[in-house]
Amino acid sequence: MDYLARLLLILHFYETTVEGRFVDSTVKLTSNMNLECIYPKTANITQMSWVKSIATDKETIAVFHPRYGVYIQDQYKDRVRFINASSKGKSLNFIKTTEADMGFYFCSITFADGIWEKVIQVIPSDSFKVPPVPPANHVITEPGENVTLRCPFRVGGLVQQVTWERIKVDRRDTVVLCNLSEGKTYGSDYQEHAIIDCAPQKSSILVLQNVSAYDSGIYRCHYSLTNGANKTHVMSLTVTSGKLRSDGADGFTSGNSVNC
Ligand SMILES: *[C@@H]1O[C@H](CO)[C@@H](O)[C@H](O)[C@H]1NC(C)=O
Ligand SMILES: *[C@@H]1O[C@H](CO)[C@@H](O)[C@H](O)[C@H]1NC(C)=O
Ligand SMILES: *[C@@H]1O[C@H](CO)[C@@H](O)[C@H](O)[C@H]1NC(C)=O
Ligand SMILES: *[C@@H]1O[C@H](CO)[C@@H](O)[C@H](O)[C@H]1NC(C)=O
Ligand SMILES: *[C@@H]1O[C@H](CO)[C@@H](O)[C@H](O)[C@H]1NC(C)=O
Ligand SMILES: *[C@@H]1O[C@H](CO)[C@@H](O)[C@H](O)[C@H]1NC(C)=O
């Protein structure tokens, strides 16, 4: 048996339960779909795998090993590929998807010091909504800045839980979840990029460090009270590209990005 086949057998027995899992990213099911997994650390990858959870069982879709290369499980071979297996990105592209492709996916990356994991849930496209952004809630900044996003609590009682999400047309990434009794949990893509203080306050303040154009998008803060009531605050963040700025001629972009 070759190395990757043996690895698949081992992976089959390793526990992945979905129950009560923290979901890092929620992706809308589309016929041509990308599940993004970009390793944020600099340590070398020992191996990586994409596993799908099916009821109480799990199924290995793909394995990547720096020396042995890429292995895609037979039933996925014709419609799944790594977008860029040679780089740090270990994202998967699916084509000809069906409803059977909905569910929970685990991108697990093993390196010398441990395991980094990202949990992605694929949901029906009609249950995925992009919220409107109120006109006053636009933040514009430049690459490399640390951006502060504020979510004022418009309630009297004690806020039990706050979730910050970044929303794009086809997916929603969890930035961080603050739970009054359980503490904070950062989304796997934000562990080294976002800072939040979860102590009870009048608002929730999220700092995104060293932003790039990649951070542009809609941000939603969802907070709930101990009595179960929910509220949301939606804003957008635009990180102007350095190119637009140096061109300087585009009235809209440069006019709005001058805040100094
Ligand atoms: C990572 O792998 C490269 C190429 O194999 C090697 O040159 C480098 O020293 C490794 N880095 C670490 C931190 O192990
Ligand atoms: C693949 O990764 C390489 C190296 O990081 C990068 O230069 C290239 O643009 C990537 N290709 C795609 C399609 O993302
Ligand atoms: C962003 O925050 C980090 C850590 O607090 C700091 O070292 C860095 O200088 C800040 N960058 C800018 C552009 O303010
Ligand atoms: C937050 O903590 C409370 C109390 O422990 C718990 O009931 C609730 O399920 C937690 N929420 C999340 C999303 O973990
Ligand atoms: C900020 O991000 C850029 C790439 O987006 C990276 O090249 C640079 O090293 C980062 N700076 C710091 C201080 O982390
Ligand atoms: C608040 O939101 C949670 C999850 O987002 C939901 O389960 C709950 O039913 C909501 N409560 C109310 C009162 O809308």
Image (cartoon, rainbow, N blue to C red):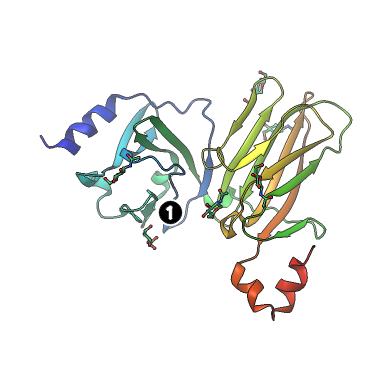
- Report the side of 111 relative to 173 (left or right): left
Farthest residue to the bottom: give it: 249
Q: In which quadrant is the C terminus drawn?
A: bottom right
Residue at 47% across / 37% down in the picture? 119
Q: Quadrant of residue 33?
A: bottom left
Question: Where is 4 relative to 241, above or below?
Answer: above
Q: How many marks?
A: 1
Work out whether residue 192 can be spotted. Answer: yes
- Residue picked out by circle 1: 34
Q: Is residue 165 left or right of residue 258?
A: left
Front position in the image: 31 or 247? 247
In the rendered image, the vertical position of residue 154 relative to residue 180, given as above or below: below
| Looking at the image, residue 14 lies above or below residue 27 | above
Q: Is residue 178 left or right of residue 189?
A: right
Image x and y of residue 118, in percent:
46, 38
Outermost residue, left side: 1
Task: Name the element at disc 1.
Answer: strand
What residue appears at the point 69 percent right and 53 percent down from the top-left corner?
A: 131
Figure quadrant of the N terminus: top left
CA neighbours of label 1 inside 10 A, class few (<14), some (14 to 19), many (20+): many
x then y, percent, for residue 256: 76, 68
| Residue shown at the point (46%, 28%) measured from the top left | 18
Say if disc 1 is inside 8 Å of ligand 2. Answer: no
Going by the picture, which residue comes out furthest to the right? 156
Q: Identity of the amino acid at label 1?
A: Asn
Q: Position of residue 216 (x, y in %)?
A: 62, 57
- Residue 215 position, x and y percent, is 60, 54
Of 35 and 39, nearer the camera is: 39
Towards the viewer: 244 or 83: 244
